[in-house]
């Protein structure tokens, strides 16, 4: 209903930008999750065999290159970009359409902090070393 009453009048360039943002988010989300899934299923598969890992005292390996070397929750970034693109379809004249993007950002930050806490308990000192290798949580070299 909001869009019907507040048509943002996006032209072709604006719509292409929104689509590009959505496509970028989808690519980041699917590629990063696909890489993690492939590594879990078969770490010797040619698509992931080249990735650098960090061994842990638990006997597992943590990825420190590829998507997961760029940021610890890079998949969340892709997921949020897709949600933001949906909100942008309603225009930028009000914060109302961005309720979802704001809510989702809060949810993802909370989830990431919770996961970070559980991983610190699970991996102990190895988690601190891992965070030295992968210092950024969502966006490489930013945050």
Image (tube, rainbow, N blue to C red):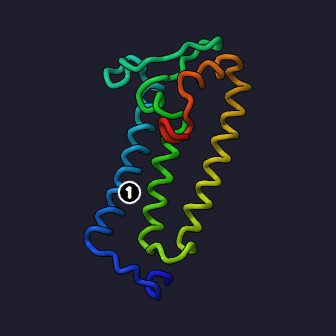
User: How many discs mark residues in the rendered view?
Assistant: 1
Across and down, in percent, residue 54 comes to 53, 15
Q: Nearer the viewer, residue 128 or 36?
A: 128
Q: Nearer the viewer, residue 94 or 112?
A: 94
Asked if residue 82 is positioned above or below residue 110 in the image, the reply reads below
Across and down, in percent, residue 110 comes to 68, 47
Dot 1 falls on a residue whose secondary structure is helix
Residue at the extreme left of the image, as rendered: 12
Across and down, in percent, residue 68 comes to 48, 30
Whether residue 10 sits left or right of residue 137 in the image: it is left
Asked if residue 20 is positioned above or below residue 96 in the image, the reply reads above
Q: Residue at x 45, y 74 (%)?
A: 90
Residue at the extreme front of the image, as rendered: 142
Which quadrant is home to the C terminus? top right
Q: Residue at x 69, y 17 (%)?
A: 125
Asked if residue 112 is positioned above or below residue 92 in the image, the reply reads above
Dividing the picture into quadrants, the one containing residue 128 is top right
Crowding near the residue tagged with mark 1, few <14, some 14–19, many ≥20 C-alpha atoms within 10 Å: many
Q: Residue at x 65, y 22 (%)?
A: 127
Across and down, in percent, residue 103 comes to 62, 60
Q: Read off the residue under disc 1.
A: 22
Q: Residue at x 50, y 82 (%)?
A: 2
Whether residue 117 sits left or right of residue 78 in the image: it is right
Residue at the extreme bottom of the image, as rendered: 5
Asked if residue 118 is positioned above or below residue 15 in the image, the reply reads above
């Amino acid at each position: 209903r909001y869009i019907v009453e507040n048509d943002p009048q996006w032209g072709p360039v604006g719509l292409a930008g929104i689509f590009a943002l959505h496509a970028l988010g989808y690519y980041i989300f699917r590629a990063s999750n696909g890489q993690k899934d492939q590594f879990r299923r078969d770490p010797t598969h040619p698509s992931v065999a080249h990735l650098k890992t960090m061994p842990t005292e638990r006997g597992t390996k943590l990825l420190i290159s590829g998507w997961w070397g760029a940021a610890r929750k890079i998949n969340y970034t892709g997921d949020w970009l897709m949600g933001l693109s949906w909100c942008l379809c309603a225009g930028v004249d009000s914060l109302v359409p961005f309720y979802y993007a704001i809510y989702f950002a809060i949810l993802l930050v909370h989830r990431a902090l919770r996961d970070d806490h559980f991983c610190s308990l699970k991996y102990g000192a190895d988690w601190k070393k891992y965070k030295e290798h992968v210092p950024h949580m969502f966006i490489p070299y930013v945050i």
